[in-house]
Amino acid sequence: MKIPIRKEIFPFSRLASPIRNAGVAKSPLGTMHGLDIVERASPPPRRCPTDRVYETKILFRSKRTMKQYLTLFWTMLKIGLFTFGGGYAMIALLENEFVEKKSYLDKDEFLDMVAIAESTPGPIAINAATYIGYKHLGFGGSLLATVAICIPSFFIIYTISLFFDAFLKFTLVEYAFRGIQVCVIYLIFSAGLKMLRQMKKTAFSITVVCLVVLCMLLGSLFAVQFSTVFYILICGCAGVFAHLLNQIRKKKEDAQ
């Protein structure tokens, strides 16, 4: 490390004593009008206290951000590990963790997130995890949440595929899956009830819910297969049409 040099000018009388000149080196520039030019090692510049406070804040923020990343990763890993039955069964656990416990999302935003995750391509669980991670920690959070929620399923399916035939022969496994199916039905039903309670009770929303439930029941009774994608598209178009009617009605009222 190069030490900065400070040049000073002293009279001859001060240079006469060797005690006074301790740590002082005579400059090769020589003398100038009865004065000697000397060089002295300058002390390192003092650090401002505000610099230390700023560095402490940066360190604290980095530790806090790392803790948030680890918390998000562990939560998504736990949900992906203990959820059976697909994304619909996972909705109840996502709401419990990120709405009620951690308050990452409010109830209205969670309902919108579920609608977006179901409407966009891909599994609803992965889409929901990506949305929550991005909302909380940006692009890195979305990537981390998506990977965390996929890791348990990947390793479990890979392990089962190695000895799939032998795995199906176990009677205990068959009965275990029957019990898990009942639990999955409960998780999906409870998630639907929570979303129904949180939904805004308007005439349009109640009408849409009743029509969708009626169509699903009729389709089940008469064995008519109708994809859920069409339900989503039809209901979305109905919502846009109702919004346009409300806008036209408001314009007419303002004109009068």
Image (cartoon, helix red, strand yellow):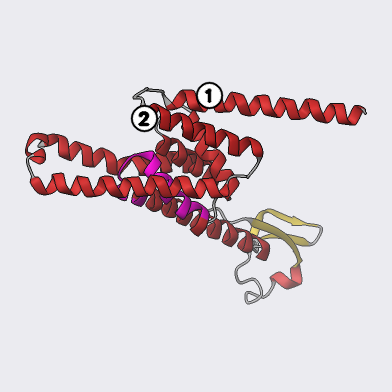
Q: Which residue has dot 2 on it?
A: 220
Q: Is residue 4 on the magenta stretch?
A: no
Q: Residue 63: x percent and y percent? A: 49, 58
The rendered magenta stretch, by its main secondary structure, is classed as helix
Alpha carbons under labels 1 and 2: distance apart: 20 Å
Which quadrant holds the C terminus?
top right
Displayed quadrant of residue 89: top left
User: The disc labelled 2 sits on which kind of residue?
Assistant: Ser
Q: Which residue has dot 1 on it?
A: 233
Whether tag 1 and tag 2 are in contact, CB under 8 A, the answer is no
Closest to the observer, 203 or 234? 203
Which mark sits nearer the N-terminus, 1 or 2? 2
User: Callout 2: 10 Å neighbours few (<14), some, many (20+)?
Assistant: few
Q: Confirm whether residue 41 shows in the render.
A: no
Q: Residue 41: x percent and y percent? A: 62, 62
Q: Is residue 97 on the magenta stretch?
A: yes
Residue at 50 percent of width and 32 percent of height: 212
User: The disc labelled 1 sits on which kind of residue?
Assistant: Leu
User: Callout 1: 10 Å neighbours few (<14), some, many (20+)?
Assistant: few
> Compared with residue 201, is residue 234 higher up or lower down, i.e. above or below?
above
- Most extreme residue toward the right, as rendered? 256
For the magenta stretch, what is the residue range?
A: 78-99
Displayed quadrant of residue 12: bottom right
Closest to the observer, 69 or 31? 69
User: In what element is the residue under mark 2?
Assistant: helix
User: In what element is the residue under mark 1?
Assistant: helix
| Residue 34 relative to residue 58: left or right | right
Residue at 58 percent of width and 27 percent of height: 236
Residue at 68 percent of width and 60 percent of height: 38
| Residue 242 relative to residue 95: left or right | right
Displayed quadrant of residue 90: top left
